[in-house]
Image (cartoon, coloured by chain):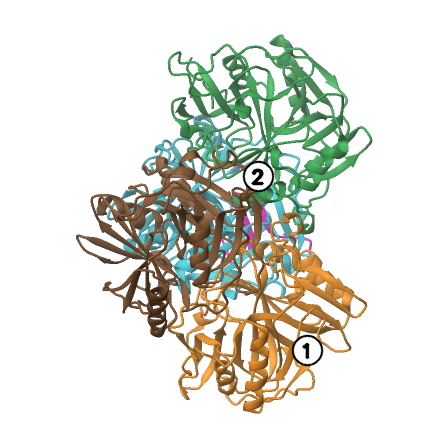
Chain colours: A brown, B orange, C cyan, D green
Amino acid sequence: MPIPAPVLYPPFNIVRLSHIVLTVTDLATSRAFYVDTLGLQVTDETSEAIYLRAMEERGHHCVVLERGDHALAKSLSFKVFSESDLDKARDYFASQGIECDWVERPYQGRTLRAIDPLGMPIEFYFRMHKLRPIHQQYKLYRGVKPLRIDHFNCYSDDVETSVAFYNSLGFRITEYTEAEDSGQLWAVWMHRKGGIHDIAFTSGYGPRLHHVAFWVPTPLNIIDLLDLMSTTGYLANIERGPGRHGISNAFFLYVRDPDGHRIEIYCSDYMTVDPDLEPIKWSLRDPQRQTLWGSPAPRSWFEEGSVFPGVEPRRPKLEASPIIAP
Amino acid sequence: MPIPAPVLYPPFNIVRLSHIVLTVTDLATSRAFYVDTLGLQVTDETSEAIYLRAMEERGHHCVVLERGDHALAKSLSFKVFSESDLDKARDYFASQGIECDWVERPYQGRTLRAIDPLGMPIEFYFRMHKLRPIHQQYKLYRGVKPLRIDHFNCYSDDVETSVAFYNSLGFRITEYTEAEDSGQLWAVWMHRKGGIHDIAFTSGYGPRLHHVAFWVPTPLNIIDLLDLMSTTGYLANIERGPGRHGISNAFFLYVRDPDGHRIEIYCSDYMTVDPDLEPIKWSLRDPQRQTLWGSPAPRSWFEEGSVFPGVEPRRPKLEASPIIAP
Amino acid sequence: MPIPAPVLYPPFNIVRLSHIVLTVTDLATSRAFYVDTLGLQVTDETSEAIYLRAMEERGHHCVVLERGDHALAKSLSFKVFSESDLDKARDYFASQGIECDWVERPYQGRTLRAIDPLGMPIEFYFRMHKLRPIHQQYKLYRGVKPLRIDHFNCYSDDVETSVAFYNSLGFRITEYTEAEDSGQLWAVWMHRKGGIHDIAFTSGYGPRLHHVAFWVPTPLNIIDLLDLMSTTGYLANIERGPGRHGISNAFFLYVRDPDGHRIEIYCSDYMTVDPDLEPIKWSLRDPQRQTLWGSPAPRSWFEEGSVFPGVEPRRPKLEASPIIAP
Amino acid sequence: MPIPAPVLYPPFNIVRLSHIVLTVTDLATSRAFYVDTLGLQVTDETSEAIYLRAMEERGHHCVVLERGDHALAKSLSFKVFSESDLDKARDYFASQGIECDWVERPYQGRTLRAIDPLGMPIEFYFRMHKLRPIHQQYKLYRGVKPLRIDHFNCYSDDVETSVAFYNSLGFRITEYTEAEDSGQLWAVWMHRKGGIHDIAFTSGYGPRLHHVAFWVPTPLNIIDLLDLMSTTGYLANIERGPGRHGISNAFFLYVRDPDGHRIEIYCSDYMTVDPDLEPIKWSLRDPQRQTLWGSPAPRSWFEEGSVFPGVEPRRPKLEASPIIAP
């Protein structure tokens, strides 16, 4: 299948990915990881949940950690441009037979929850409690100095269906890989906010969250995090990297949180605001698409991910080629 | 005057600043500076003009150097979202009594030229000749490794009028300084593409171009450029920096091209795509607004700039306070 | 005067500069600066003194802060190769009419105190209490991530006498400036440990300490310190920089401690272990000797320094040329 | 075996490692790698050999590439303190039954060639043709910006014998690994110039050269080299890294030259000039000794190396444990 044409005038205006809600099994253990090690800032904290923001964000949260019995990716959230976009979203979803409902979320205005065609829970809001800037309070910077949430990456058992849906919402494709024999889309990167992606999909048992990513200032911050994690008991949590992706050109590191949720630390991709930017196609036969420098990803990186609540991952429509496997 | 409210649904959709046309008095001398020293890539070259792009850009040019008798800033160009936005722009300008006309520009589709209320020549296009990506051809990286054009900064003799006009076009204010006694706007940073600014205005003899800026990967690239310029005959072209701005939080360096046009090398400001992001106000009494680390800018930085063709700079409506002067 | 020939087989073997004792007027205030801001590690602490080491040092201290009524540089200390070198030092000083005596110093073995020909108190020891390595305890890194003490820089009212003395002790000259009219030495950099200097002398009211320097990993750590100091109440303590020295090629920043003692943060000079390395001569007329990028040092940097106890600074033998003054 | 005690007053004074002579099969191909890609500077060039220096070196060469039929490590060279040290070296070697002879080497003064107890050809000189400094000619910096040769690393079939010999020459041990069952030395790092090593030995089929290393300014230069090599046809020449060694704490990358000679790019180890610095012992069971961040080295890194002329590598006395193998 050729990639779909961009929808330049989507049914409602999504500004960017906004935050993720993760279920974790021990809040204190997760706090040590997300706050003391990665360096996210606590904006609220109860016995049931911790709210976090990154250093340049003024919205109340980019990560919500909720206490639970099992590690889950509870929902992926997006900010829309204005309140009227929420109503347009509701109408659009209704017209498409997409299940959706209004929900209450702390520190947010009206919030719409929907289930995407593959079963992923996605949420939309237009207003979040604003906090005062801390990006120049340099004494607060710690760990990897996370500046902002950057993207979600998801396994999909049916990438073409996932891409068609998010394309219809106005997400624009920046880079992609195609299965050469069948011509089917294998993995696709899609954006709203002007970088390589707000969300990406890769063929695999899905739907599952592959990772959530945070933007940091330079590769040296990633080296700092590696030094820190490898000498504070987090050696086994380092999964892949550091390296440069061929796709996106970003410098990356993948680490796992105490429950196994995968976190990417990411910087230096490129600007994509032009609506006529041509997507870059990569061959699955090109190992540099994953790591420009050639080193392969470990098997866990291809296979493991976070389950969404109540959605049993399904076998992917596309067979993994031997090229993909580590 | 309070800053104007953002115009969330502007009369036409400007995507970003795109390129600048500079008149220079000797193309070979300018080429040594822009190409061999800064590291921009030549995309076309004649006896009358040189076209340049930065490393992650796919459009044909972000700088056009034209041979001329005098150093001039010929025009500031912006990319609009679609062809229909050009027509909407023409209609809007007409309705506002803004002089505009269709012009022919090499490597561009239909292009609209207008004169802003202060006399600055601005141009709009929607389609530019596309070149293939070179951001992963690392052997081409040189000099300061410029990734993309980032913004224009202009002197205005009437900042409030300038801001009102660009605000009406949908540019959103991110940071600003106010003259404390009069409450008048002194300097304003305004964006379309999601950073601190596509264009900024500072009170001064105007209209004139203060500088055009290029985005680079990290502060270390700026240090590399300083080392290079100071040992290749460009010592006197280093004007200010390196340092970190209070406003924008960016790491910066200002250099002058062989004709005196001012170039900023810039990185690490923050993302501003949220339409409800609150502008940050700075006091003119706070010297950290200019350099977070406290070192003052030289007098030339406050006084010198590039003239636009046929527009005699006028004395600014606001008096420079002693705080501003070096 | 031509620079003196290196003494390749000196009377005793000095390994490197080792530590400084500074009198400060408020230990808590100094602790906030040296520990919380610069990032040195406390190795002992009493109501009268704080002992500090840098991250890669295994000796007990590189800085001793002693409580006192006035800010003073109490002594400059050097490590010698073996215990027998202490006795050779004593004999040598005696033969030269240099006043010296054995003193007791906490955490050190036998220690010899001498007064150099200009009146500076210098101390020598061969054994210091060893601490276990912390250079891979990355959670301890803070502030500018100081790795080790690098050098002392002193005003001398008679640079040629200072240089002759330290040259006789085996310090080898790496770079120097000469007063062009008189041919007299203006400033000299001298090393034992294989870098540009363990100690340097500049003409000025002396003897006084100009600064003590600490080595850090990269220029980005210096940028981090600037960001931190300028947003935690230390803006006025930033005196000069960041920049690259022409002499030494090092990247630098000068800050002042709460009592005015000057600290240089320093990195990326070059290796000088070859005994036949030819000193590099700089002209006082070359402003790039101080800052390769051209920006001048402030007047305070040329004039202020820390007094040694009981030694009244004397007018320098050389007149400051207008070129030197800011 | 316990590590030998340091010999503080060795029979002659070696200043540092100096240069390597490598036989390569095609000078043009090697030039493209060493000059155009790594960034070493050509100081002489004939149809038979290329002489190279790094950016802060003033001696004529740190690498000599000689045309030959087979890739060989021809010799490892060291600089001694003075001419008399050459004679002392000859006498010492004679007294120890070490084969040695005076040889002629272009651009060097008197040069002594010896064969170490394991069969490695080593050379000593005191004077080399000096070139003027280029460390501030920033336009010459290219590739990884190599500043200086840093160390040799060799396979030895009998590490204890190798270490005993170089220890007797005054090389001081900084870090080492021991085979836990037998207590035998597995790998040892030894220095003269004040870093972690001028030479290191690891148990393996030997004698062979494992790699020669060059010092670069920061980890970002290593990232630049990876980007360059992976997009200019050298992808397969990237063997291991980037990463941080546990041993030495250095940031590293291993690449292979066109003939398979292994080059390490290296920075940020620590200063070791103190004669009483205690060596750091690592367990072979600790995978972080090799890569602090945990990722294993590939099999080729443990097995491949450059042969010395006329010396058949021998099976190592120590069995490789399963822990060592990749």
Residue to which mark 1 is pinned:
B74
Q: Looking at this rendering, what residue extends furthest in the top direction?
A: D97
Secondary element at image label 2:
loop
* Quadrant of image for the N terminus of chain B: bottom left
Q: Is residue A158 left or right of residue D255?
A: left
Kindly identify which chain the residue marked by label 1 belongs to: B
Q: Residues within 10 Å of mark 1 (few under 14, many from 20)?
A: many
The image shows residue A326 at horizontal and vertical percentages of 47, 33
Tell me which residue sits at (47%, 48%) in the image: A220
Task: Please tell me in which quadrant of the rendered image residue B34 appears.
Answer: bottom right
Q: Looking at this rendering, what residue extends furthest in the left direction?
A: A47
Whether residue C262 is situated above or below residue A262 in the rendered picture: below
The image shows residue D106 at horizontal and vertical percentages of 77, 28
Residue to which mark 2 is pinned:
A285
Which mark is in front, 1 or 2?
2
Q: Is residue D240 magenta?
A: no
In magenta, the rendered stretch is C182-211
